[in-house]
Amino acid sequence: MTYQMIQPRPLDLATSYVFDQPRALAPFTLADQYGNQFTNQSLQGKWSLFFIGYTACPDVCPTTLNKLAAAYPKLQKISETFQVVFVSADPERDTQIKRLDYINFFNKEFKAVSADHKALFPFSRDLGFVYAMVGEDSDYQVDHSASYVLVSPRGEKTAVFKTKPTPGQLPQIINSELISDVNKIVSAWH
């Protein structure tokens, strides 16, 4: 199926920002949870929703993956080629096997990708994500973005979904708003 934006028009979106001009991602090579290469080619013909984190994350990542697992059936109804991609920003500890076990706990269809920092940093920056190691030696945490990025079936960064902070709670993206926005964005393409 070939996709293209029908016409640039304002969309009434709850939690996302759509780029006026979709941006092609620079060439990248990561590895998925099965040890297979995950490259620009892995995005062709699929809507891809990315977020960044790490498997030892105490709160944001498991909450996000639970929410995405719950939203996934509805996202697949919008596009049967929809894929969710968890980007691990902790390649030292998040081995292939660890990413496989972690992502399978939430949804076996999701991707869990990573690479060494030399490849990971420019890729995450290209998506608009930030991350930083905080702490010493092996006892460190990873501060990371909590937003999602939607990449079109042409491998172009199309939209960013931002969290809505609520005092005393984790910043999060509400599933109903995510699903509604994805539906509007995908419907604007043919």
Image (spheres, rainbow, N blue to C red):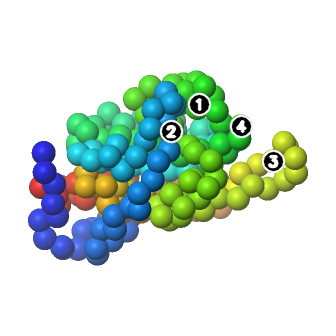
Q: Nearer the viewer, mark 4 or mark 3?
A: 4
Say whether marks 1 and 2 touch (CB < 8 Å). yes
Eyeballing the image, is 113 above or below 130? above
Is the residue under label 1 in contact with that under label 4 (CB below 8 Å)?
no
User: Which mark, by number, is residue 111?
Assistant: none
Q: Nearer the viewer, mark 3 or mark 1?
A: 1
Q: Is residue 87 left or right of residue 56?
A: left
Query: Which one is earlier in the sequence, the residue at label 3 or at label 1?
Result: 1
Q: Residues within 10 Å of mark 2 (few under 14, many from 20)?
A: some
Q: Amino acid at mark 4?
A: Arg
Q: In the drawing, does residue 106 fall left or right of residue 144?
A: left
Q: Which residue is mark 3?
A: 140
Q: Which mark is residue 31?
A: 2
Disc 2 and disc 3: Cα gap in Å? Answer: 23 Å
Among the two numbered marks 4 and 2 on one chain, the one whose residue lies closer to the N terminus: 2
Residue at the disc numbered 4: 93
Residue underneath mark 1: 96
Residue occupying image coordinates x 25% and y 39%: 81
Q: Position of residue 151 (x, y in %)?
A: 34, 55
Is residue 181 in view from this perspective?
A: no
Mark 1 surroundings within 10 Å by alpha-carbon count, few (fewer than 14), some (14 through 19), many (20 or more): many
